[in-house]
């Protein structure tokens, strides 16, 4: 694919920056990522998926993000349509688990594990094609 080398170099730099951020963001967090950075990362992931023509893998790779977003949508819809009844204790989904008694670091690590499994499933589907 033409231009894949440039994309790979850009993504390698981005991965290095994210690893540096995660080093200081481990529990307890010393640095927080705001909306500007998280929206930028999501935009980069979407743009790269379009560039390499793998946009159908985005819901798989971003499964945790999809689940978090759907939990908010479902919670708001349920609250409005069912006159105040909720599906989750709190939305987004990670707060539901925290209110259920699961410690925040445990929720974070489990979401990491789910993300890694989904990433491996997406990479495996590339080989199948």
Image (cartoon, grey):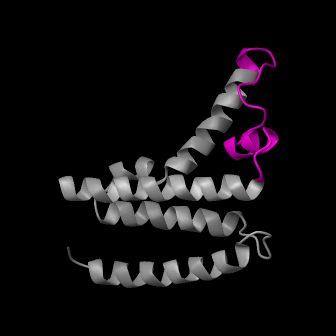
Q: Is residue 83 above or below residue 70?
A: above
- Horizontally, residue 28 falls left or right of residue 39, namely right
Task: Report if residue 93 lies within the magenta region.
Answer: yes
**Point 77% across, 75% down: residue:** 31
The percent position of residue 98, horizontal first and vertical second, equals: 77, 45
Q: Is residue 117 shown to the viewer in this render?
A: yes
Is any part of residue 129 visible from this angle?
Answer: no
| Secondary structure that dominates the magenta span | loop
Q: Position of residue 61 (x, y in %)?
A: 43, 54
The structure residue drawn at horizontal position 51% and vertical position 56%, both measured from the top left corner, is 115
Q: Residue at x 81, y 19 (%)?
A: 84
Q: Quadrant of residue 17?
A: bottom right
Relative to residue 20, is residue 94 depicted above or below?
A: above
| Percent of width and height locating residue 68 | 62, 44
User: So how many labels did they put on this image?
Assistant: 0
Residue at point 47% right, 59% down?
116
Q: Is residue 104 magenta?
A: no
Identity of the residue furthest to the top in this view: 82
Quadrant of the image occupied by residue 23: bottom right
Image coordinates of residue 125 in percent, x first then y, are: 27, 53
Which residue is at the front of the view, 102 or 15?
102
Question: Which region of the structure is painted magenta?
Answer: 80-103
Report the side of 48 relative to 115 (left or right): left
Q: Residue 96: name its quadrant.
A: top right
Query: 113 or 76, which is in the foreground?
Result: 113
Residue 48 as seen in the image, left or right of residue 40: left
Rendered-image quadrant of the N terminus: bottom left
In this view, the residue in front, 70 or 122, is: 122
């Amino acid at each position: 694919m033409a231009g894949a080398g440039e994309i790979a170099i850009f993504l390698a730099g981005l991965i290095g920056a994210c690893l540096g951020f995660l080093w200081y963001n481990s529990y307890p967090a010393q640095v927080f990522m705001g909306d500007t950075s998280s929206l930028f990362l999501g935009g980069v992931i979407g743009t790269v998926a379009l560039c390499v023509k793998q946009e159908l893998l985005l819901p798989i790779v971003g499964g945790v993000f999809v689940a978090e977003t759907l939990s908010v949508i479902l919670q708001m819809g349920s609250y409005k349509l069912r006159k105040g009844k909720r599906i989750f204790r709190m939305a987004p989904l990670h707060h539901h688990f925290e209110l259920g008694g699961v410690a925040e670091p445990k929720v974070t690590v489990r979401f990491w594990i789910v993300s890694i499994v989904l990433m491996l499933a997406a990479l495996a589907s590339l080989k199948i094609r």
